[in-house]
Amino acid sequence: MAKVKTVSLTRYVTRILLLAFSSVIAILILALILFQILISTGKIVPANAGEKAARKDLAHLEESKVSSSKLNSKFSHYIYFTEAGKVQETSLSGTELKRTLQQYKNRNEEYPTGAYVTFSDGSYAFLTWQYKAQFTNKTLRTLFPNFEILFLIGIALILISYFIWFTKKTSNYLQAKLALVEQASLQIAQENLDSKIDDSTDILEFNRVLQSMEGMRVALKESLVQQWETQEQRKQEIAALTHDINTPLTVINGNAELLLEESLDSEQQQLVQHIYESGIKTKQYIDLLQQVSNFDVVHEEKEQISLEDVKEELAQVLSQLARQKEIALEVQLETMTTIVAAPTMLMRALVNLGENAIRYTEVGKVMIRMEKQHQKIFFVFEDNGPGFSSEALVHGKEMFWQQDQSRSGTSNYGIGLSIVERVAKYHKGELRLENTQKD
């Protein structure tokens, strides 16, 4: 692959400005050349053509001392006056005649664009001209009396068109380079870390940015791989640890259960019962610990799911637990809609919240509402339990945080709400803990 030649951004901008300046000079030179070609081919006459024609006619009139009908009024104009100063004949008319008479009313004054001549009979004439290039074609000269303005407008339009084209081309070029940076950012944001970021632009600063992003990609990939390997290793270690603990724990629980079937005195019965219950709680704690470990390394794919299906499954799973505690369970869905979610993870979090609400409710009912507000879906769980303490509102979502009397005397491992919080964040949401206002 051929190596791309690179330049600094300063040099590129300098080159662009020089190119633009050179192009403007070239356009102006070409315009002057075209102007000269039009003059040399007789398409237009130079700016002093009217003066030359008028001076020639003046010389003829001064020599003959009489008026003449053979004046060249193609690029200049004339006015014949009687001895009394009345206009006798003229090539001008209307407003232009009035303006000329007003502007050149003093016969004894010398004008740069006009001159008087007096005849032997006392009558006189005035010839006037303008310094401007004109078309030799009468029709074109009538339509465009001032060729120079037309020519300048044409040059201005060409320059404007060129600058629009040049700006668009330069903008497209820079946008193509910026698109590479945007593409690289999007690639990293989407965690597509396997593909190398292309840094083969021809501008040094863009290359440096892309190279930095490539370094970021490599470092992030290595970090994620290392993190995944660490999590996988931790999962395996916890699995091995729980397996090693479960074996003797099963033996202890089994023996305790056998002892409970024997004839023991009251004190021995209490001791063995305590051993058995502690073993069961330890087993539950180990299962939850392994559950948290598995959750950290498993990310379920999201898919379209119906909230109606979520409602039915949630009611089915929680209704048995509610019946056991003889409390009412109501699941409401205000709007039939679908959402993009990880179904197993979402249901696991919702069931966890529902079980908590039922567990801490002794009398009354548990209300579960699914609402749509501002393009967001809210899952609201309300119960008649004792509510959260001020400490629980702050720390309740933290892993392994426990407060035995925050809601009731029920044992709590401080894991459930933490898992729910992680599921919410996985779905770009959040878990909120609030107490309802009591009347």
Image (spheres, helix red, strand yellow):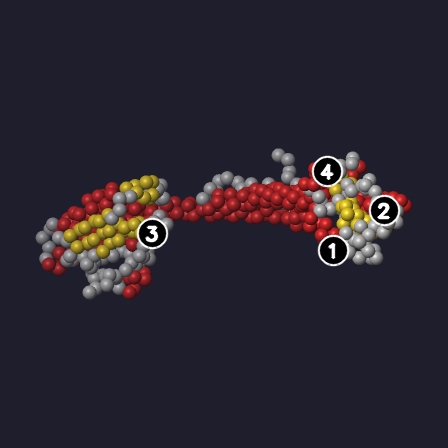
Q: Earlier in the sequence, mark 2 or mark 1?
A: 2
Residue on which disc 3 sits: 374
Say whether residue 350 is left or right of residue 187. Answer: left
Q: Earlier in the sequence, mark 4 or mark 1?
A: 1
Q: Find the distance from the CA under tag 1 to the CA under tag 3.
A: 77 Å
Say what secondary structure mark 4 lies in.
helix
Task: Classify residue 142 by image quadrant.
Answer: top right
Say what secondary structure mark 3 lies in.
loop
The answer to whether marks 4 and 3 mark residues whose Cβ atoms lie closer than 8 Å is no
Q: Earlier in the sequence, mark 1 or mark 3?
A: 1
Foreground label between 4 and 3: 4
Residue 395 locus on image (x, y percent)? 32, 61
**What number is the disc on residue 102?**
1
Q: Earlier in the sequence, mark 4 or mark 2?
A: 2
Say what secondary structure mark 2 lies in.
helix
Q: Find the distance from the CA under tag 4 to the CA under tag 2.
A: 23 Å
Q: Pick out the residue farthest to the right.
A: 63
Residue 358 locus on image (x, y percent)? 19, 54
Residue on which disc 4 sits: 138
Residue at the spot 29% in from the left edge and 51% down from the top edge: 378
Residue on which disc 2 sits: 58
- Please, what is the three-letter code of the amino acid marked with disc 4? Lys
Q: Find the distance from the CA under tag 4 to the CA under tag 1.
A: 27 Å
- Please, what is the three-letter code of the amino acid marked with disc 3? His
Q: Find the distance from the CA under tag 3 to the CA under tag 2.
A: 89 Å
